[in-house]
Image (spheres, coloured by chain):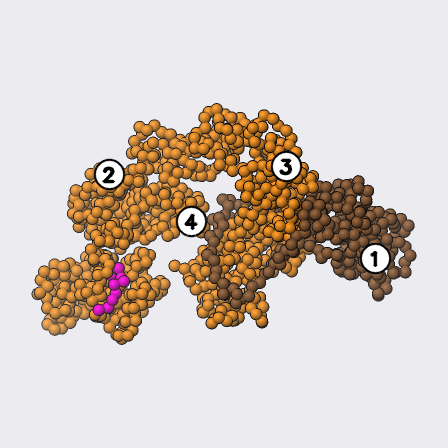
Chain colours: A orange, B brown
Amino acid sequence: MGDHAVHATFLPGDPARRGTFAFWRSDGRISDTNSEFVVAQSAYGRIRRHRTPARILPIDAAVRRLLDGDDDTDSARAWRAVVLSGLGQLAAGRLAPGRSATGTAAWRVLPDPAATDWLHRCAAAMPPEAYAAPTTGAGRALLRTPASLITACWDALADTLARTAADGSPVAAYAGDEPLPAEPYRRLLTAIDTELAGSVRLVLRLCLPTPAEQGVREQGVPARDVPAPDVAAAADGASAPDGAAGNGFSVALAMRSAGDPSLVVELARLWSAPSEVLDRFGADAETDVLLALRRAARVWPPLSAALAEHAPSALPLADEDVDGLFEAAEALGTAGADVLWPAELTDHSPRLAATTKRPAATGPAAFGLTDLLDFQWQATLDGTALTEDELTALAEAKRPLIRLRGRWVRVDRSLVARLRRRRQRVGGAQALAAALTGTLSTADGEVPFTPDRPLAELVERLAGAGSEVPPPDGLDATLRPYQRRGLGWLAAMTGTGLGGCLADDMGLGKTLQIIALHLHRHTLHCGPTLVCCPASLLGNWEREVHRFAPGVAVRRFHGSDRDLGALAGDEIVLASYGVLRADTATLAGARWGLVVADEAQAAKNPLSRTAKALRAVPAAARIALTGTPVENRLTDLWSIVDWTTPGLLGPLADFRRRIANPVERYADADATRRLATLTRPFLLRRRKSDPGIAPELPPKTETDVLVPLTAEQTTLYEAVVRDTMAEIEAAEGVARRGLVLKLLTALKQICNHPAQYLGEPGPLAGRSGKLTALDELLDVILAEGESVLVFSQYVQLCRLLERHLADRGVDTLLLHGGVGVRQREERVRRFDEGGAPVFLLSLKAAGVGLNLTRASHVIHVDRWWNPAVEDQATDRAYRIGQDRPVQVHRLVTEHTVEDRVAKLIADKRALADAVVGSGETWLTELSDTELADLVALS
Amino acid sequence: MTDRAHRTGGAGPAPDEEIAIGDVPPAARRRFGATWWSRAWLDALQQQALIDPNRLPRGRTYARSGAVRDAVVAAGTASARVRGSRPTPYQVEVRVATFDDAGWGRVLDAIGGQLAHTAALLDGELPPSIVDDVAAAGLPLLPGPRELTVSCNCPDRAVPCKHAAALCYVLADLLDTDPFALLLLRGRPRTAVLDALRDRRGGTAPAPAPSMVDTVAAAEAYARLPAPLPTPLPPPAGPGTPVSLPATDGVDLGALTALAARAARRAHDLLS
């Protein structure tokens, strides 16, 4: 969906906050240009420097554009990733004062080892356009390296975000916007350079006492001439260096490359073979290590004992100092020393799990999403629950490590504290979510969760939902197998009160499955059903209920005289979203057995009035219907599922933070898995292309889309009928025939669009019910990525539609009788290749043998009124339905001549032979009264 | 671009055989002798000047006013050109007694006895324990008044004259940030000292560091095939505490940390 042509290039500034981003296109045609800059581009193997128009934005505006905008080139995506990573480092507090190349005060980022590593990987992934601003005006074109620009960009972010507009700050050089010299801060900056930005990190590896000498405690003195152990053993963290204190704890000293965290070497080797080590780590490494030792000793005093030796390799540790090491671990990290715990400690720590406990006799029907359930903490070690004795030992431990089940185990004070708070509560929806994903979200983070029997059984039932249900009484249609399964799923989800979203592709019969569901629930005496949908679909729903469930009362809650009185228990009420918003109180006052939201993407914005109105209507069960792949924008998905199954996905802010952002921005695999397990039971989606379904579909499915007239159309329609009928009654013969045809043409055009009838070029939006319906249909079709043919008798209308769709950003092709053969073939070819999703055709184009099989949808905006010249002729001409099933939509204005002629044609099909010719002149044979009935607005 | 490639002050990679201070810019408020060892250095100077204490304040003024030019420190000696009342600057030299090889051997053994000593020197600090350990080996690390010889071609007979005093104050400033300058005055440059200390721990000198290259030819950039883009780093759950800044006198660290915390919050908001 994004713009695949706009490149992004970072232009560093001095000081850093003056850095900018240039957005530009290779062809120079960037819209909203505000400046230009020199870019080095490659053409025919040569490098060319030239000025190109660009939109140049300062850091804050550029960040907004990169994060929220649609620019989708490799360079834009690369800089988006850089900005996200940089903001992440800043959010973690990793910034410090620094100075620019001209000595001006500017903030800088202090990347942690993971970020430094990421920086180099990203630099290797940068496309040339991302850093294509040359540093020289003449001679060989030189570019700043991607790595240096990423650093400069991160510094620009830091320098921008740290500043306020406040005057009178004691550190004005770093607080205000005015560039000031960094000279007064020279000492601080030097200290930062040496202490915080070093390229080598110290590693303090905690070594455990060997179990044999448990009882005897000596202050072991590390030997001076320790043979250097292998790098591999050091990284493994398995054992203490030979000869060092084997009777108590000790810390082995090592060094690690900040850029390559897997490169770890014991300090003993640095002392014994320095040239080899410094070769790999760089000449400054020795200085870095010594400074890191000094800083670390300030933060954790026991380390100064190591500094008192001339070539230390390990440090014996008293029991009481081990606690201090745990507490100082974070400060040590800031000082440049990482503490490495023995694998034994982390793999075999006691873990916390949560579980709900209810007696097994509670039936599944008693489960409610808003119920409050008790849950308890459990501690497990290696998968087995801790016994009371073991728990007591943990809770009463005075030392940071104790022996449990033959091993050293870390005593985590916060874990013990949580164990003490035994009983807590969780909402039913939250417990269900935890039972599905296996983890419970608590204030202390994600915790493994074991559901009790009733919850576990419910989860099993959800997994098995979708078994077929016998077709209900009163259904006047045959359900296809996938529809029977859909009915079974709907019945299970509504039966448990959990709600769900049916997201089948358009044309698979969602309406039919809902009608069947209503009939099924009627046998359970659930109460009336409310269906909320766009106004253009009210007519369709009503027709389909009459067709498939003739015994069911259906009413439209619509119009100024709408009324909800005498609501029957098995009735279906239809309301548009507009009426739902206007009349929420009335609708909320009734007791609905089922509420259905059709085209539920109308409520995808959780803050909209539609969404709020939907939530205000209580129901025993809720089902959302949608044809668009709602999993594309996760906040839209949240809005729909939060309505059908309140509380399942938690509050929106939490959902965004824990799932939506990690999945959409960082491609987090774990968050993706959690999202899938949570939503799968509540979302049923079948595609036309699914293997079980495609063969079951007929080649062509036809639907009438009944649309209302706008007020303007109604006025025009009535006026034309009044005036022309009067003339017709007074006329005879040829003159009369002419007038009838003139009337019918006028009415057709009015039903299409007033602008077509009045011969105006615009405005177009909001004046025609058909246009609104067309827009809604196209939204769904195009979101599915499919192609569609749009037919009209009138070239003028096709032109109006072409312009209207262009204004909405939809690419179209147009074909009519006046188009030459070569042009015609060119456009057909473009459509076939996917060049534009919408093909507007005027029926007079009468093409023979055009290959338009790419289309899976056909929309007839208006029709020929002749039973002999049916759509089949058009279908044959365009080979519709031969390669793939096609859905045909006919837009028909309700209660008008179009509506009635359609019925008339259907009736007269049997008498097709009686109609002569291919024109519409047969209509002129109708009597005045018949004609009046036909054209009246009712 | 923030200056990353170079480190200035205490731990800078100085070119070896001499430290070129260059022209000392004027700075009205400069205080000389911020650290205990530069004050000890100045004490030696003052003891020499017992004869005529008036010269020292004049020397301070010269050091503050930008009169000292082309100052250079080398083994056992420091020199500069100091502008006086005459148009032509005077040539000033300060000589310090150097240690011979045997003396240096004892100094290096003393420094090398504890890793903490080398770490302190690299950190721009001269802890008293170094001076004590070297003294225990029979040598004064800091020069006393008898070990300093100053000379100047100005007409003033006092020793030290104000020009020589000016240079000594400038040297005190240098010693504040770079104790290796003291070792250089005693005869050995920094790299030689570090190499010798490294040898005592048991090894040979390091290979030179690769140079940092900051630009790339455009032709090369366009010819390269970029690697796949890594997914961005995940953000923290909430705004983090800013990195703690090293303690420094005269700087309001609290205000800086508050600004950093604010940046962290704003960054976190942008990501939510």
Residue that label 3 marks: A315
Residue A596 on the magenta span: no
The residue tagged 2 is: A526
**Residue at image coords 23%, 60%:** A883
Between circles 2 and 1, the one closer to the viewer is 1
> Mark 2 or mark 4, which is nearer the start of the sequence?
2
Q: Residue at x 80, y 40 (%)?
A: B136
Is A616 situated left or right of A714 in this image? right
| Magenta stretch contains residue A854 | yes
Whether residues under marks 4 and 2 lie with C-beta atoms below 8 angstroms apart, the answer is: no
Q: Amino acid at mark 1?
A: Glu
Marks 2/1: CA distance? 106 Å
Which residue position holds label 1? Answer: B93
Q: Tell me where the magenta segment starts and ends, as one range.
A: A849-859
Q: Amino acid at mark 2?
A: Cys
Work out whether mark 2 precedes mark 3 in sequence or the reverse, and give the earlier one.
3
Judged by depth in the image, the label closer to the viewer, 2 or 3, is 3
Asked if labels 2 and 3 share a chain, the reply is yes
Could you confirm whether marks 2 and 1 are on the same chain?
no
* x 48%, y 26%: residue: A390
Q: Position of residue A825 (x, y in %)?
A: 28, 71
| Rendered image quadrant of residue A841 | bottom left
Q: Which residue is mark 4?
A: A663
Kind of residue sitting beneath label 4? Val
Q: How far is the residue under mark 2 from the one under mark 3?
A: 75 Å
Q: Secondary structure at mark 2?
A: loop
Q: Chain of mark 4?
A: A
Check disc 4: other Cα within 10 Å, few if <14, some if 14-19, many if 20+. Answer: some
